[in-house]
Image (tube, helix red, strand yellow):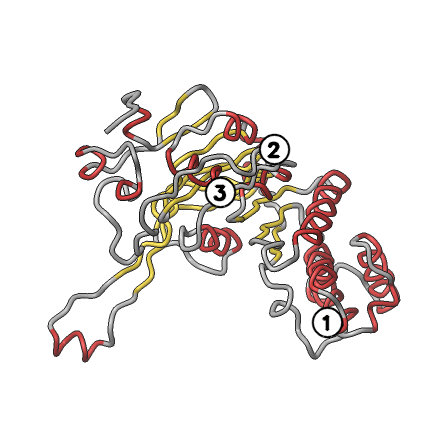
Amino acid sequence: MAMLDVALSVKGLTKKFDISAPFLNRLVERKPKRYLCAVDDISFEVPKGGCVSLVGESGCGKSTVARLVVGLYAPTTGAVAFGDHRDGNALSVQMIFQDPYSSLNPRWRVRDIVAEPIRELKLREGEAAIDERVDDLLRVVGLSPKDGAKFPHEFSGGQRQRISIARALAGEPTFLVCDEPTSALDVSVQAQILNLMRDLQDRLGLTYLFISHDLSVVRHMSDRIAVMYLGRIVEDAPTEALFDNPLHPYTCLLLETIPNVDMPKRAREAAAGEVPSPIDPPSGCTFHPRCPLANARCKAEKPSLLQRDGDRRVACHAIEENRTHP
């Protein structure tokens, strides 16, 4: 991918959290510090105007990646770079949060919530220009300018998320980080919000990093999907290639959880075990306790994310060895 086409480049990103007991407890009990590795040496790129999604079960580190990208967390190691830095320009970035009930100030009217980024970034001069911009943004997300006089509690969950999108757009970003923006909404409302976001991307030329636990959601949005498990990317492929021919056993497991209208009673094998604790992850490939293809090498050696079949990356010893059984 040419550098001019890259909106976001993530290289060797790692984030560790100190979860140690207080100093005196450790001193008395003679215990070392403990760390939780939420994100473990991941690298990926997002092309300008595209949408790349990070997918995985709760606790896999995808929301931590979102916060690292927007600067809410500082990385332990690795780098996050936006845009083409050869000409000194970086993309403006905003974030849409998961919960529309807690991410909006309940004491502020909607007009003030949307206007705040405009005032702080000095994007318009004078209250008349700010009010006009707020009215435009509310229309863009499918609300009425009259809604600006209301408080967040007067809206449904889907309408609140539209307000959150308007607030994010108020900063005039070119890059949006979307941290599970539909997971708190009903299925029918999810579709409305996803269609709105897709329409906004086409109209405004936005670039998305989309975070979700639901592969059926990201299929509608994404050009490319990176599947995460316990802080690492285990498979990274173009969307349709991943759905048509999933390679990693964990990707296959996630796809099996999607309901199939055509085959509602199809036979599905339950996944063995639960997601291990990220505080004390398994040795080698962290998926090996749940993997039907795991062998001794999987238990001892961490797999590398290797290029395969052209534009795809997979971290799996079984795939590397063309192995179909342990």
Which image quadrant is residue 179 in? Answer: bottom right
Q: Which mark is residue 266?
A: none
Label 1 or label 3, whichever lies nearer to me, is 3
| Above-or-below relation of 65 to 306 | below
Specify which label sits upstream in the sequence, 2 or 3: 3
Q: Which residue is mark 3?
A: 257
Q: Is residue 70 left or right of residue 326?
A: right
Q: Earlier in the sequence, mark 1 or mark 2?
A: 1
Residue type at the position of mark 3:
Thr
At which x and y percent is residue 33? 21, 65
Q: Secondary structure at mark 3?
A: loop
The residue that disc 2 covers is 262
Indicate the secondary structure of the residue bearing disc 1: helix
Q: CA distance from mark 1 to mark 3?
A: 34 Å
Type of the residue with mark 2: Asp
Residue depicted at x 66% and y 69%:
104
Image quarter in which the C terminus is found:
top left
Question: Few, some or many C-alpha atoms within 10 Å of disc 2 (few <14, some 14-19, many ≥20)?
Answer: few
Mark 1 to mark 2 CA distance (whole Å): 40 Å
Question: Relative to 268, is 7 on the left or the right?
Answer: right
Mark 3 closeness class: few <14, some 14–19, many ≥20 residues within 10 Å: some
224 is higher (above) or lower (below) than 184:
above
Q: Horizontal and vertical percent for residue 183?
A: 58, 55
Eye-nearest disc, 1 or 2: 2
Residue drawn at (76%, 73%) of the image: 154
